[in-house]
Amino acid sequence: MATKTTKKKNTGNKCKSKGRRKTAKESRISVIITAIAVILLNVLVLTSIVHYARTPKMYDFGKERSYGIDVSSHNGKIDWEKVSKKVDFAFIRVGCRGYGDGNIFLDEKAKYNMKQAQKYGVPYGVYIYSQAITAKEAEEEAKFLIRHIRGYNVELPLVFDFEYAYSGSKPVGRLAHANLTEEERTYMAKAFCKTVKRAGYMPALYASSYIYKSQIKPKNLPKGTVIWVADYNDSVTYDGSYDIWQFSESGKVDGISTAVDTDYWYQ
């Protein structure tokens, strides 16, 4: 927006310029430099507008309850042509942070799964299995997802998969041993979601009913964050609002040779 300026009278000492007049060539160069500056400014403004316009909207499946799956390399090589006839959506693991050393690695089936889901028209989102113990690490995980989905048509949310690693019934690993407070866990999830939103994608948080009830405050997450609850009971035991319910970890879907996580998305 142009700023209105007001001309003021020169009430001080009048000084005559002692410099020489610009040549025609110098005048042309000055005009060219000014024009370039104006063009660059317009590009910056347009870039800002385009980025703002990428604010995502909730995907509409055209039904109140949609059926989907979430998959990783643990599910082997998936026949997405068959799967596409059975599901409304999918979430694909793209990354994983080790619960021991804390290193992040790319899921070995991520690229295949994204390409195939896209090829056969299955709307999909992506997730990273987190073992972050600081907000900085959570942001790092968000940036990892964003970097590895470039060039893919990811229509559904980017998910912060918050869960503990277990040995039998005992939680183990860096996240379990960090003994974070509820505020610290919430702050990590918030940092992930804010990073995703800034990049123009929709964020989501995946966790169990137990974690939602006692270890994270979902109301403190950025507005528009999709809430995905894992609960293998007859109904969700978390009494807050949610969007997706992972109701089984032993589902059977044609095209997948292993048991698979199955979900309902409510709209």
Image (spheres, rainbow, N blue to C red):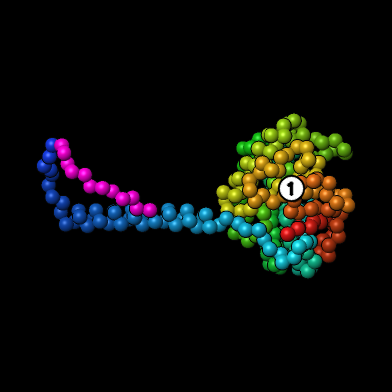
Determine which quarter of the picture holds residue 255: bottom right
Q: Main secondary structure of the magenta part?
A: loop
In this picture, is 134 found above or below 201?
above
Question: Foreground: 147 or 211?
Answer: 211
Residue at point 68% right, 63% down? 60
Residue 95: horizontal and vertical position, in percent? 69, 48
Determine which quarter of the picture holds residue 62: bottom right
Residue at point 75% right, 65% down? 63
Is 259 left or right of 125, judged from the image as shown? Answer: right
Q: Which residues are magenta?
A: 1-12
- Asked whether residue 130 appears in the rendered view, the answer is no
Residue 266: horizontal and vertical position, in percent? 75, 58
Q: Which residue is mark 1?
A: 206
Residue 59: horizontal and vertical position, in percent? 67, 61
Residue 45: horizontal and vertical position, in percent? 43, 54
Q: Amino acid at mark 1?
A: Tyr
Is 217 left or right of 146, judged from the image as shown? Answer: right
Determine which quarter of the picture holds residue 76: bottom right
Residue at point 55% right, 57% down? 54
Residue at point 82% right, 36% down? 171
- Asked whether residue 209 appears in the rendered view, the answer is yes
Task: Say whether residue 133 is magenta.
Answer: no
Q: Residues within 10 Å of mark 1 (few under 14, many from 20)?
A: many
